[in-house]
Image (cartoon, rainbow, N blue to C red):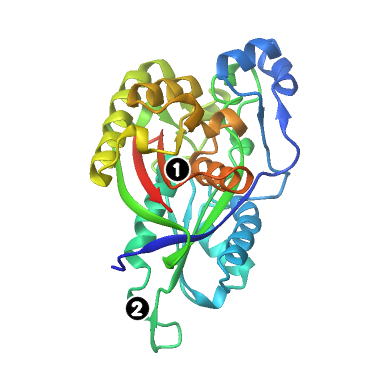
């Protein structure tokens, strides 16, 4: 593994105009002011009909490739983190590969939900620079890896009072990062992420389900709303708090950093207020903490990289960056980046 694998370029894309809470309030049966106060989210973005996560990621990937001075012919692998692929199969990475005009290389999806970007970073670091067979049979190298993250969650939400918990929180968007041995950019440091499968039904979308026979979904499931995402935010709060804090502290220890050394802390969860409380308990002050969900809704795998790109472009992120997220799985984790 190369000793100095870095994020050489970033790109992000939020579709369409922002959707204010007032635009959702009537359908969800809640005053706009109360909806915003309860969720901590004022705006979110929804993709237009016909657009999938690979369409959103295409814009972000082009931007990341340009900033990394990288051509698609330099890529050896595409990793796409998403919980909402364009179709059941093949994966969104295959669609993105085609739309980019990338060569015949490996293209795979990662299903790690809100920690998908962290998982993508770890995979990219493992592959970047490693020798592998080229598409034409010659020895090649994974010189650069494109890690994309994208979600179109809005097309699967319940826009009725029954969906008041998650519908105003979940949103669409995409980001991409070009990763490989480089002299400039953000070096990928310690990464810690884990999943507890005993909690799968505490934050999930049950249907359509391939385990359900003879059809993946039937009228009764639709009537009960079992095809919409559901979450127990109250019950998960103490679990998410304890596990995210542990992961973040492990990453800080791995890097020999103190919380005061962190210039920018991005912490993402469907409940922005819990994310802020966790940051405060870790010891990172509010001025150095950004909660992506509070800015543009919870975009699961894409939340962290969208916020990272936007902050880096708009005001800078300093030398030491800490990423943390939690979501369905239950999955959680943290990662360190250093300029």
Image location (x, y in percent) of residue 243: 29, 29
Inspect this view and state whether residue 213 appears. no
Image location (x, y in percent) of residue 61: 59, 60
Q: Is residue 223 above or below residue 15?
A: above
Nearest to viewer (mark 1 / mark 2): 2
Inspect this view and state whether residue 242 appears. yes
Give the Cα distance between marks 1 and 2.
42 Å
Instruction: State the mark number for residue 132.
Output: 2
Instruction: State the mark number for residue 214.
Output: 1
Image location (x, y in percent) of residue 189: 33, 52
Instruction: State the mark number for residue 265.
Output: none
Q: Is residue 121 above or below residue 26?
A: below
Side of 243 where 124 appears, left or right: right
Q: Quadrant of residue 4 in the image? A: bottom left
The residue located at (51%, 52%) in the rendering is 88
Q: At numbered mark 2, what does the secondary structure look like: helix, strand or loop?
A: strand
Q: Is residue 169 above or below residue 6?
A: above
Q: At numbered mark 1, what does the secondary structure look like: helix, strand or loop?
A: loop
Going from N to C along the chain, the mark reached first, 1 or 2, is 2
The residue located at (56%, 71%) in the rendering is 70
Q: Quadrant of the N terminus?
A: bottom left
The residue located at (33%, 26%) in the rendering is 282
Side of 10 where 51 appears, left or right: right
The residue located at (44%, 42%) in the rendering is 113
Pick whichever, 176 or 205, lies toward us.
176
Q: Quadrant of residue 237 in the image? A: top left
**Label 1 close to label 2 by CB (< 8 Å):** no
């Amino acid at each position: 593994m190369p000793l100095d694998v870095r994020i050489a370029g970033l790109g992000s894309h939020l579709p369409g105009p922002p959707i204010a809470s007032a635009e959702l309030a009537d359908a969800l049966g809640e005053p706009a002011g109360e909806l915003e106060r309860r969720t901590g989210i004022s705006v979110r973005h929804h993709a237009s009909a016909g657009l999938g996560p690979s369409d959103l990621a295409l814009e972000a990937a082009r931007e990341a490739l340009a900033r990394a001075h990288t051509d698609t012919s330099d890529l050896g692998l595409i990793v796409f983190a998403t919980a909402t692929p364009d179709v059941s199969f093949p994966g969104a990475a295959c669609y993105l590969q085609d739309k980019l005009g990338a060569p015949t290389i490996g293209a795979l999806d990662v299903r790690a939900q809100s920690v998908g970007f962290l998982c993508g970073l770890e995979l990219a670091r493992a592959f970047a620079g490693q020798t592998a067979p080229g598409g034409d049979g010659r020895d090649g190298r994974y010189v650069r890896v494109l890690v994309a993250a994208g979600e179109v969650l809005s097309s699967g939400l319940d826009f009725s009072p029954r969906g008041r918990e998650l519908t105003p929180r979940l949103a669409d968007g995409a980001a991409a990062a070009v990763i490989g041995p480089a002299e400039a950019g953000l070096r990928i440091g310690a990464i810690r992420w884990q999943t507890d499968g005993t909690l799968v039904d505490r934050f999930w979308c049950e249907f359509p389900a391939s385990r359900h026979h003879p059809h993946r979904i039937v009228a009764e499931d639709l009537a009960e709303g079992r095809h919409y995402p559901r979450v127990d935010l109250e019950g998960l709060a103490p679990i998410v708090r304890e596990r995210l804090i542990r992961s973040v502290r492990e990453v800080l220890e791995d890097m020999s950093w103190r919380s005061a050394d962190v210039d920018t802390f991005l912490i993402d969860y469907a409940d922005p207020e819990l994310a802020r409380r966790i940051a405060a308990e870790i010891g990172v002050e509010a001025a150095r903490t950004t909660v992506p969900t509070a800015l543009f809704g919870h975009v699961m795998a894409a939340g962290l990289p969208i916020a990272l790109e936007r902050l880096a472009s708009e005001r800078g992120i300093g030398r030491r960056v800490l990423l943390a997220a939690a979501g369905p799985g239950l999955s959680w984790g943290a990662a360190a980046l250093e300029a």
